[in-house]
Image: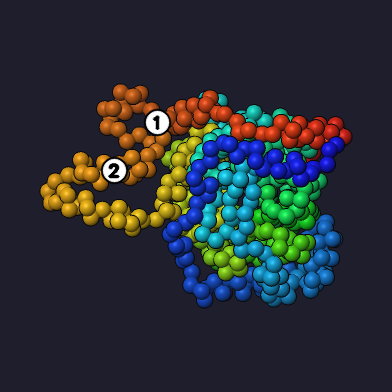
């Protein structure tokens, strides 16, 4: 098995550079974040988070190494329960964690800068099912996975290839991560995420990244962002922490994201959810810094409310939006990037419920100042399904977010006094010089929305938004052209996967 080296990495980083990339590979917000809590209120939540860490503690399941690491840094342990002196975690994180970092793509034009005033929009993650108007709801396959990689690559409003876009249920659980990672590398040149379902799969992700980028480059730069969930309430397991430690040792980003369904995995109130989520996030990010000081981290929260009648998670709710807003403010105060929001919905199909729930969460995330917006596109059924039509509908909204984030044009052209002088009172602006010079770029033009008259809409077939989205995603897949990938790197990736897959038997046990 060839050892990843510098020469392969150099070619890997330039192989896709001939593919045309958008002028803006991520959003740089020109609008200020909106905060709903005062500094005094945020300090209360920070104090409460430290109280949770100090008095209640965090359970660390089946990972004595992580417990020993915490204890050596000043924490105390009673079996698996670890308690942290007030302020310990914040001090460790602020001492070494970067406030902003670059995740490198194999096409450097698509590198993303995570943190600060930047927002990176990322597809949905983790669904075992896919949904399309034509095929209905069904188990996802590796072909579906490749399709979503291709769609994400072609959507300018999405800046990232994502991670587990859907679970390819036709492949063994213990080996499917190879094919998913290879698909991200082969069919896109945008940045991507690694596997976290076992520490050894995290190491496989690092090893495959080193084939693409080079051993030394990976050790010195971030090329993988990785989702590390807490088992809320106030628990981490050895699978997640094991993956976190692998990535941190290799200088790759750990996105520590408590998964909270309020009312079941936390108290029902927004302030309590925010404090608990922060405490869990501080614990995970501290371990990353203790493993390798300076390793990039992202504080995240995934929050939904719960129907108190049925127990089902709900999305797009005002309570969850408040926690997103507060979480973003807390991350800025801590000095690390923040992950949250997305095109969330509990709807089973891309209907009106799906549209308004997704819009509520996407827009709240943007104005809150979210830096890494996982689940931007495709999310259906509370995350159980990845929708083809929903994917391109959400990507359309992602394009709109970028326009809004660019703010108001206050240039001379934006003020348009020349047009006002030319036209004067009581006339129209359709033919004036300013309109003629700006009409092509004046307003966002959706590829899905229908703005024609009722009569024209009928004549065109009376198509719903779902049908129009179906036509769009199918035309995109038909037109897909892959980015260039160095044949030598491709061959080494395939050899690595083949050797690994044949070294142990298939298993569908996670």
Can residue 172 be seen here?
A: no
Task: Please give the count of numbered marks on the rendered protein.
Answer: 2
Q: Residue 69 carries which label?
A: none
Q: What residue appears at the point 67 percent right and 59 percent down from the top-left corner?
A: 297
**Helix, strand or loop at disc 1?**
loop
Q: Quadrant of the C terminus?
A: top right
Which of the two residues, 500 or 381, is positioned nearer the viewer here?
Answer: 500
Labels 1 and 2 touching (C-beta < 8 A): no
**Residue 9: percent from the left, percent from the top?**
73, 43
Which of the two residues, 61 or 278, is positioned nearer the viewer here?
Answer: 278
In this rendering, the label closer to the viewer, 1 or 2 = 2
Q: Which colour scheme is used?
A: rainbow
Q: What residue appears at the point 50 percent right and 51 percent down from the top-left corner?
A: 27
Determine the CA span between mark 1 and mark 2: 33 Å
Q: Mark 1 points at which residue?
A: 464
**Residue 101: percent from the left, percent from the top?**
62, 57
Q: What residue appears at the point 71 percent right and 59 percent down from the top-left corner?
A: 295
Can residue 398 be seen here?
A: yes
**Residue 407: percent from the left, percent from the top?**
39, 56
Indicate the quadrant where residue 241 lies: bottom right
Indicate the quadrant where residue 211 lies: top right
**Residue 152: percent from the left, percent from the top?**
56, 38
Q: Name the residue under label 2.
A: 437
Q: Quadrant of the N terminus?
A: top right
First in sequence, mark 1 or 2: give its number: 2
Q: What residue appears at the point 55 percent right and 34 percent down from the top-left corner?
A: 151
Using residue 510 as the reference point, say whether residue 87 is left or right of it: left
Using residue 395 as the reference point, say whether residue 289 is left or right of it: right
The image shows residue 440, relative to residue 288, as above or below, that is above
């Amino acid at each position: 098995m060839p050892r990843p080296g510098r020469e392969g990495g150099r070619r890997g980083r330039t192989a896709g550079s001939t593919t045309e990339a958008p002028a803006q590979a991520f959003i740089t917000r020109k609008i200020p974040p909106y905060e709903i809590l005062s500094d005094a209120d945020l300090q209360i939540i920070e104090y409460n988070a430290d109280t949770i860490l100090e008095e209640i503690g965090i359970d660390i399941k089946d990972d004595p190494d992580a417990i020993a690491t915490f204890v050596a840094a000043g924490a105390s342990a009673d079996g698996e329960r670890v308690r942290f002196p007030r302020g310990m975690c914040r001090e460790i994180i602020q001492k070494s964690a970067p406030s902003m970092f670059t995740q490198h793509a194999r096409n450097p034009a698509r590198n993303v800068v995570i943190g600060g005033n930047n927002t990176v929009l990322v597809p949905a993650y983790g669904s075992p099912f896919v949904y399309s108007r034509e095929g209905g709801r069904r188990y996802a396959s590796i072909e579906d996975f490749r399709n979503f990689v291709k769609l994400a690559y072609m959507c300018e409003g999405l800046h990232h290839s994502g991670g587990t876009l859907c679970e390819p249920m036709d492949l063994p659980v213990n080996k499917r991560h190879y094919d998913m990672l290879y698909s991200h590398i082969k069919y896109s040149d945008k940045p991507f995420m690694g596997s976290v379902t076992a520490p050894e799969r995290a190491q496989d992700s690092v090893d495959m990244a080193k084939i693409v980028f080079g051993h030394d480059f990976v050790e010195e730069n971030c090329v993988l962002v990785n989702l590390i969930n807490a088992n809320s309430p106030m628990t981490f397991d050895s699978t997640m922490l094991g993956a976190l430690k692998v990535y941190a040792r290799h200088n790759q980003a750990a996105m520590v994201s408590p998964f909270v369904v309020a009312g079941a995995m936390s108290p029902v109130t927004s302030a309590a959810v925010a404090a608990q989520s922060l405490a869990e996030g501080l614990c995970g990010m501290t371990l990353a810094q203790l493993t390798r000081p300076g390793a990039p981290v992202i504080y995240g929260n995934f929050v939904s409310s719960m129907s108190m009648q049925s127990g089902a998670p709900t999305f797009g709710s005002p309570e969850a939006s408040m926690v997103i807003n507060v979480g973003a403010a807390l991350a800025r105060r801590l000095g690390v990037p923040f992950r949250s929001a997305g095109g969330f919905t509990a709807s089973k199909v891309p209907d009106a419920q799906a549209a308004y729930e997704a819009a509520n969460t996407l827009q709240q995330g943007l104005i809150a100042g979210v830096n890494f917006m996982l689940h931007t596109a495709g999310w259906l059924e509370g995350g159980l399904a990845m929708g083809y039509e929903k994917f391109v509908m959400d990507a359309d909204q992602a394009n709109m977010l970028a326009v809004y984030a660019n703010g108001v044009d206050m240039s001379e052209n934006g003020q348009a006094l020349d047009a006002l002088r030319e036209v004067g009172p009581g006339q129209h602006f359709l033919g004036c010089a300013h309109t003629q010079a700006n009409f092509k770029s004046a307003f966002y033009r959706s590829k899905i929305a229908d703005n024609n008259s009722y009569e024209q809409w009928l004549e065109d077939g009376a198509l719903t938004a779902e049908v129009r989205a179906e036509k769009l995603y199918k035309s995109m897949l038909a037109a897909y052209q892959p980015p260039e990938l160095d044949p030598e790197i491709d061959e080494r990736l395939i050899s690595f996967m083949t050797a690994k897959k044949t070294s142990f038997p298939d298993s569908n046990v996670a």
